Image (cartoon, grey):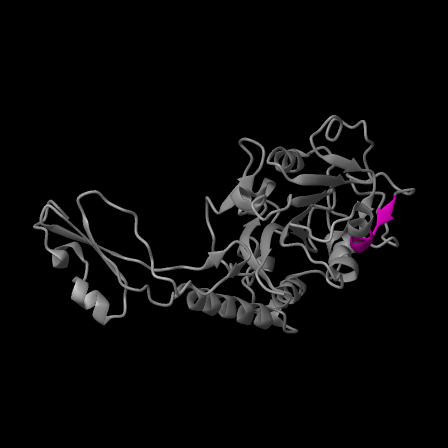
Amino acid sequence: CSHVSGSRRQCGFPTAAEARAMGGASHVFRCGGLAFMALCVGYGVHMFGVRQASKAPFRPPTLKGAEVTTTRAPPTILPEAFRKLAEAARAELERGAQPGAAELADKKKHGWVFGSVLISMPLAQPIVVPVRPRGAPPSEGKNVVGMQVLNATGRKCVVYGMGIAGESHFEQTMAESGCETHAFDCTIKPDSPAVKDKAFTFHEWCIGPEKSKINKNNLYLVGGGLRFKTFTSTLKELGHPVLDILKFDIEGFEWTLFEEDLLPASILPNQLSFELHTEGANTAFVPPEPVKGKSFEEVNALILRLFDLGYRVVDKAVNYDQFCSEFTLVRVAD
């Protein structure tokens, strides 16, 4: 602006009087004869919800040699903007969950099965922090919302990681960040390099309904004799009334986990970071039985149920296998 003429008009700013007439809070800094306007939008985006902006007047920083004029900030438009976006995303899920909706999907598009799952809470870095091995694509990592403040709630954050196999980068990173982190996998032993001598606590059981069946042809699993404990019983046994993040990548068995264990639970995680597998996924990694009949309409019905439980989709990353996708959801309401 200083290279134009000092004109507020040419800088694209309203005058102080215009801003006040519009109900805006004008913070006018007059330095050396030039006027600069900062329209303060008091926003109330919380890590786990959208809050109404404070009615207290904004207190700008003290600037030496500057004259500061302050008026009260207007009610924020952000909650309404987020609400509208979430409503549109829910409506799309509702349409996609209707019987026969898959017939209208563009099946030539990569990841068409997940095409009606829209981002319902658009957040970006640094609020969203990707956690993945160096050089790995987004489809091979997990995202965490508000990692910077997870331990700023007056208690230590708690993280569960399900489905380790040979990769525990996420669990190790969360433990090193200061969260109490627990890893669960009934298919590997405590002396596995993925879990031995790590910063997190390893439990040799799988979280899920105890009647869960294991497909012996699954590359990641080793057959019978595996221990299962439900999500609720695990929380109780470990003494966790609150769970900040639940991460899982369990090769198709997430459908049973959701339907029989997570969705009916009385305690729900604040964040979900998971891979969703559907019918058509590579059977070398995903056994066909748990994903049978799980396609476009079922994906939308599941995310719709999560929406109505207060979750919003922050991130979606379709894999190279178009029938699998990573998701990050954050709970904003009870």
Identify the residue shown where x is 61% and y is 34%.
173
Q: Nearer the viewer, residue 199 or 262?
A: 199
Q: Position of residue 134 (x, y in %)?
A: 55, 31
Q: Nearer the viewer, residue 57 or 176?
A: 57
Identify the residue shown where x is 78% and y is 40%.
185
Q: Position of residue 150 (x, y in %)?
A: 58, 45
Q: Position of residue 239 (x, y in %)?
A: 78, 48
How many numbered circles does the render carry?
Answer: 0
Which of the 4 image quarters holds residue 304?
Answer: bottom right
Left or right: 82 in relation to 74: right
Check residue 231 for magenta coloring: yes
Left or right: 266 in relation to 309: right
Identify the residue shown where x is 68% and y is 52%.
277
Q: Nearer the viewer, residue 235 or 156?
A: 156
Quadrant for the C terminus in the image: bottom right
Residue range corresponding to the magenta coloring: 227-233
Identify the residue shown where x is 85% and y is 48%.
228
Q: Position of residue 273 (x, y in %)?
A: 63, 49
Q: Nearer the viewer, residue 331 or 255?
A: 331
Left or right: 50 in relation to 55: right
Which of the 4 image quarters holds residue 58?
Answer: bottom left
Establish if 298 lies above or below 189. below
Residue furthest right as drawn = 225
Left or right: 36 in relation to 210: left
Check residue 159 for magenta coloring: no
